[in-house]
């Protein structure tokens, strides 16, 4: 990558009135957490069928199998550490350059890296909720449940991960906040997402359509690249620290 796009991106961020970041699984790849799509042999959907694991129907059919997959992911995530990409975003927020991180990730690594204003569009693997629609039980967890599938202490139905599955709506409060932030932002830093999953992928589009600047960091081109104003090709853990350094010089 030549320095020119990096400088262009740094200028856009340093002069932005209101910038946010929008992240996907690619930012956690260097922490050892597999992405969903992509050519990598480690991408989750090349090994598992989403319809067998990440749908409400799959959970109804076989809650134990779905939980086994989540326990496997929880253990991976628990051992993982935030990488320099997460850390650079936390520093950009501390500097006031970005106001928030809107993420599709459920791993909690942004918060562990020090990001404070994180909007989780797809929920969190570190929360459970009751699968009975009539029950409102929700709880935070810090380790995988000992017995799976775990049961709701309030009503006895099975608990499920508090994440968004295919065919489910996004949590209303998170989605509302993400749209509100996008509507007041003039710049967005998109990192490590294929941009394939809606409605999440509308967030950078809202900023583009409002005349704002879209900066993208990815190892390959994505569905967002055709409308990105600046494309920074490379790994998040390498590009974001360089971008932070370049922005800091301009402040
Ligand atoms: P994807 O797996 O679809 O895309 C990951 C993106 O990260 C790809 O574009 C990769 O090229 C890029 N990437 C990989 N390694 C990278 C690195 N080191 N640095 C920068 N980029 C890198 O993940 P998402 O876009 O997050 O939803 O997927 C969106 C949603 O689809 C997920 O939240 C999940 C999934 O189904 C639900 O589970 C509801």
Image (spheres, grey):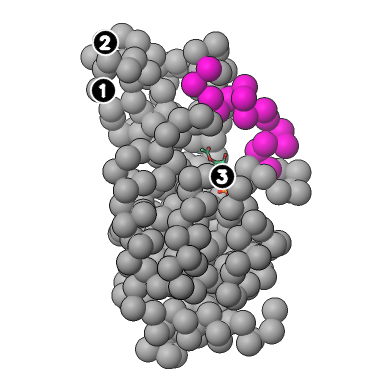
Q: Which residue is mark 3?
A: 197
**Residue 128 falls inside the magenta stretch:** no
Gap in angstroms between the C-alphas marked 3 and 1: 28 Å
At a point 76% along the width and 49% down the height, the residue shown is 39
Q: Which residue is mark 1?
A: 137
Q: Secondary structure at mark 2?
A: loop
Looking at the image, is mark 3 or mark 1 nearer the viewer?
A: 3
Q: Which residue is mark 2?
A: 155
What segment is highlighted magenta in the picture? Answer: 43-57
**Between 220 and 71, the one nearer to me in the picture:** 220
9, above or below 238, in the image: below
Q: Quadrant of residue 37?
A: top right
Looking at the image, is mark 3 or mark 2 nearer the viewer?
A: 3
- Give the mark nearer the N terminus: 3 vs 1: 1
**Between 226 and 13, the one nearer to me in the picture:** 226
Q: Residue 200 has which mark?
A: none
Q: Position of residue 227 (x, y in %)?
A: 60, 67
Gap in angstroms between the C-alphas marked 3 and 2: 33 Å
Q: Position of residue 202 (x, y in %)?
A: 49, 53
- Give the mark nearer the N terminus: 3 vs 2: 2
Q: Mark 2–mark 1 contact, CB under 8 Å? A: yes
Mark 3 C-beta to ligand 1 under 8 Å: yes
């Amino acid at each position: 990558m030549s320095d020119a796009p990096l400088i262009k991106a740094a200028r856009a961020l340093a002069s932005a009135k209101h910038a946010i970041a929008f992240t996907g699984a690619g930012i956690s790849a260097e922490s050892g957490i597999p992405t969903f799509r992509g050519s990598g042999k480690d991408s989750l959907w090349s090994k598992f069928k989403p319809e067998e694991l990440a749908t409400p129907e799959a959970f109804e059919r076989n809650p134990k199998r779905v939980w086994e997959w989540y326990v496997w992911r929880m253990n991976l995530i628990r051992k993982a550490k935030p990488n320099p990409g997460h850390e650079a975003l936390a520093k950009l927020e501390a500097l006031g350059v970005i106001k928030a991180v809107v993420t599709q990730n459920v791993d909690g690594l942004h918060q562990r890296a020090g990001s404070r204003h994180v909007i989780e569009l797809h929920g969190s693997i570190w929360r459970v909720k009751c699968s009975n629609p009539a029950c409102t039980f929700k709880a935070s967890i810090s380790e995988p449940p000992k017995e799976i599938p775990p049961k709701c202490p309030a009503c006895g139905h099975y608990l499920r991960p508090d994440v968004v599955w295919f065919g489910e709506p996004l949590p209303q409060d998170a989605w509302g906040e993400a749209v509100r932030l996008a509507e007041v932002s003039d710049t967005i830093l998109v990192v490590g997402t294929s941009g394939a999953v809606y409605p999440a992928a509308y967030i950078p589009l809202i900023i583009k359509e409002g005349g704002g600047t879209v900066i993208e960091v990815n190892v390959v081109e994505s569905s967002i690249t055709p409308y990105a104003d600046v494309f920074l090709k490379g790994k998040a853990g390498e590009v974001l620290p360089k971008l932070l350094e370049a922005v800091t010089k301009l402040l």
